[in-house]
């Protein structure tokens, strides 16, 4: 019985993958001509199929594993850092309430007044809020310090993580903006600069950030960055950027793709 | 050590034991690197993309379904990462610096012939569109079924088989043209 050509193509694939029995193979090769295929052609396809599977691939470098493990360590640290405060309180309470002491009547004589006092203390909103505010401002400060330190690291991955840390901050101060702008204009790695553009874009409501993004256009040599900045200027509808883009267009060595993108961007902004 | 399955490890990562991601990385880093290397031809780009995939696995770990399979899920993330890469770089051909490793265990003549053949195959591969190149590479990943490739690429198993066959046929045509 003759099957549809499309179904036969699937049979060919089974032959190429070596998933046919000897009898099926024999039968398949005998019936090839009915579907307009030559045996030689199919055997060549099988050879090619095998060559793709055998493509030689080098070993990934040791640095790839190191980068992954440093990312994992960082994630573990962050996770621990975020949950440590609440978790340690829960741990202490769990230890107390599951210990032998919890079954001693004297324990209740002590714990009840402590609980009442703790309840009164916690319900005092002003003190509580102040403590929470102090704590979150300390965390923010620590994150800021961590971010600024990581930005100085020689590894590009570490610097990308540093820039991404900014996304966890509720507000960014001038110091952080200055650090991000410096990274955008002077980091040697394109990926780091691309991540920095995305991050700065989140703060584009801030006039200083907007102004720095515009100023950065003429300073960039990489077409990827020039194109990313062009996209952002269109998203922000920032007409002031046209002057900077024109400066780029004057450069003779400007990449063709970037030139095309800039011309389109100017058109959209006018 | 294959005592604990990928899915069980990923469930542990999902529930907060992120250390287990290290085991998944060790199990799959070579295969994933190979997938990206065959697609892009660049060692550094492939290493960056592997890092990117594991970063996303960590970030979106809670999205891993209880009944899901880790390998197709990871490769779906890898597929998106490679598509983003090609889109951002607007460069679909293999890297010019793509170098073929010397084939061990063959005499010099066989080695030269084989290397020449592989070089021609590389040129033919670079002329294929990225989606065809990718489906051929995916179909050669050990343990990945056509059905799972279909789930990744959002098409049926039969459709995947047809696509693989046609990509192979196109590759053969390109290869023959280069050979002659």
Image: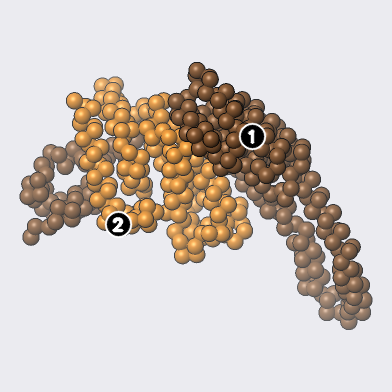
Chain colours: A brown, B orange
Q: Residue at x 80, y 73 (%)?
A: A97
Q: Chain of mark 2?
A: B
| Mark 1 or 2: the one toward you | 1
Depicted B127 relative to depicted A17: above or below: above
Instruction: Tell me, for residue A213, which label it has, or none.
Output: 1
Q: Position of residue A69 (x, y in %)?
A: 60, 43
**Which residue is more in the foreground, A206 or A107?**
A206
Q: Position of residue B10 (x, y in %)?
A: 53, 57
Q: Residue at x 77, y 48 (%)?
A: A140
The quadrant of the rendering that contains the C terminus of chain B is top left
Q: Is residue A252 visible?
A: yes
Residue extending farthest front? A270
Instruction: Give the CA separation, mark 1 to mark 2.
Output: 48 Å
**Which residue is more in the foreground, B8 or A220?**
A220
Depicted B115 relative to depicted A232: above or below: above
Q: Which structural element holds mark 1?
A: helix
For the residue carrying disc 1, how many other residues have a C-alpha within 10 Å: few (<14), some (14-19), or many (20+)?
Answer: many
Instruction: Tell me, for residue B157, which label it has, or none.
Output: 2
Q: Position of residue A175 (x, y in %)?
A: 77, 37
Label 1 in the same subunit as label 2: no
Q: Residue at x 26, y 21 (%)?
A: B109
Q: Is residue B30 visible?
A: no
């Amino acid at each position: 019985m003759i099957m549809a050509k499309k179904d036969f193509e699937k049979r060919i694939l089974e032959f190429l993958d070596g998933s046919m029995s000897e009898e099926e193979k024999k039968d398949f090769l005998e019936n090839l001509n009915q579907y307009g295929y030559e045996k030689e052609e199919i055997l060549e396809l099988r050879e090619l199929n095998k060559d793709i599977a055998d493509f030689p691939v080098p070993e990934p470098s040791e640095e790839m594993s190191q980068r992954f493990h440093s990312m994992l360590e960082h994630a573990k640290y962050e996770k621990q850092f975020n949950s440590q405060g609440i978790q340690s309180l829960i741990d202490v309470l769990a230890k107390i309430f599951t210990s032998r002491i919890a079954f001693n009547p004297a324990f209740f004589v002590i714990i009840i007044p402590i609980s009442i006092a703790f309840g009164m203390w916690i319900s005092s909103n002003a003190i509580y809020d102040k403590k929470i505010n102090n704590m979150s401002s300390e965390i923010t400060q620590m994150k800021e310090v961590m971010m600024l330190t990581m930005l100085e690291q020689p590894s590009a991955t570490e610097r990308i993580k540093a820039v991404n840390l900014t996304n966890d901050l509720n507000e960014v101060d001038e110091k952080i903006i200055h650090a991000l702008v410096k990274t955008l204009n002077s980091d040697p790695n394109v990926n780091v600069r691309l991540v920095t553009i995305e991050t700065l874009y989140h703060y584009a409501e801030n006039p200083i950030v907007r102004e720095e993004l515009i100023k950065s256009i003429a300073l960039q040599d990489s077409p990827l960055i020039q194109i990313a900045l062009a996209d952002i200027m269109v998203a922000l509808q920032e007409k002031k950027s046209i002057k900077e883009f024109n400066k780029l267009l004057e450069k003779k060595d400007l990449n063709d793709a970037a030139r095309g993108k800039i011309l389109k961007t100017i058109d959209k902004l006018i | 050590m294959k005592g604990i399955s990928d899915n069980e490890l990923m469930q542990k990562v999902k529930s907060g034991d992120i250390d287990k991601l290290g085991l998944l990385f060790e199990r799959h880093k070579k295969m994933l690197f190979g997938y990206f290397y065959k697609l892009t031809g660049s060692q550094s780009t492939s290493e960056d993309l592997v890092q990117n995939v594991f970063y996303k696995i960590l970030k979106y770990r809670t999205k891993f379904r209880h009944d899901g399979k880790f390998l197709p899920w990871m490769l779906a993330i890898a597929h998106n990462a490679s598509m983003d890469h090609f889109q951002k770089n607007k460069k679909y051909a293999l890297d010019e610096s793509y170098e073929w490793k010397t084939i061990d265990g063959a005499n010099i003549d066989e080695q030269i012939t084989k290397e020449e053949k592989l070089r021609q195959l590389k040129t033919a591969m670079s002329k294929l569109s990225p989606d065809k190149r990718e489906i051929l590479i995916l179909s050669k990943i050990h343990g990945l079924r056509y059905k799972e490739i279909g789930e990744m690429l959002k098409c049926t198993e039969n459709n995947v088989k047809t696509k693989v066959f046609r990509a192979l046929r196109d590759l053969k045509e390109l290869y023959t043209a280069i050979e002659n």
